[in-house]
Amino acid sequence: MSADPYLLAHTGIFVILMTLLVQWFIASKTKASQSGAIPGKLDPSLSHESFVFRAHRTFQNSLENLPLMLGTTFLALFISANALWTGIFIWLFAMARIGHMALYYAIATETNPSPRTWFFMLGLIANVGLLALCGVSFLP
């Protein structure tokens, strides 16, 4: 059995997907637990002081960020970009999303930038870094 050079990347993808699944469960459970909850509708009067709102936004923010990251990740794997750096960027994104999630759940603030903004930016930097790695991999 050969060693997987992309094991770091593969485990990072697993963590990202598990984080999304956890966020989905938390957002669904907290919303469904509200009296008079209507499937597919969020009370428009809710804001950051509501955990239901924050759980929903955390999940939505991950959904907004994942397509580009997963597309970039799959491109890196398809073109055999440097395995170590691919794994590092994926794990950086995974940890940034977990940090963003934890802060969004814990802190009810409408201040911008908020502490979670730093984790959002870290995830963005990881994504841009991985995309740049893919671009460099195309060079002769």
Image (cartoon, grey):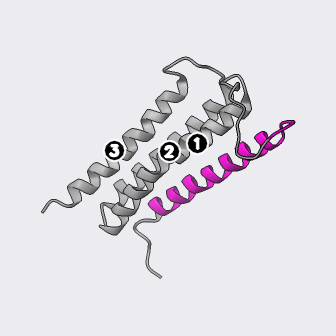
Say left or right for 42 vs 135: right
Q: Amino acid at mark 1?
A: Gln
Residue pointed to by mark 1 = 60
Q: Secondary structure at mark 1?
A: helix
Closer to us: 14 or 63: 63
Q: Amino acid at mark 3?
A: Val
Proximity of marks 1 and 2: CB atoms separated by less than 8 Å: yes
Total numbered circles: 3
Residue pointed to by mark 2 = 64
Residue situated furthest bottom in the rendering: 1
Q: Secondary structure at mark 3?
A: helix
- Disc 3 or 1, which lies upstream in sequence? 1
Q: CA distance from mark 3 to mark 1?
A: 20 Å
Magenta-drawn stretch contains 10: yes
Mark 3 vs mark 1: in front: 1
Q: Which residues are magenta?
A: 8-37
Residue 74: image x %, image y %? 40, 63
Q: Amino acid at mark 2?
A: Glu
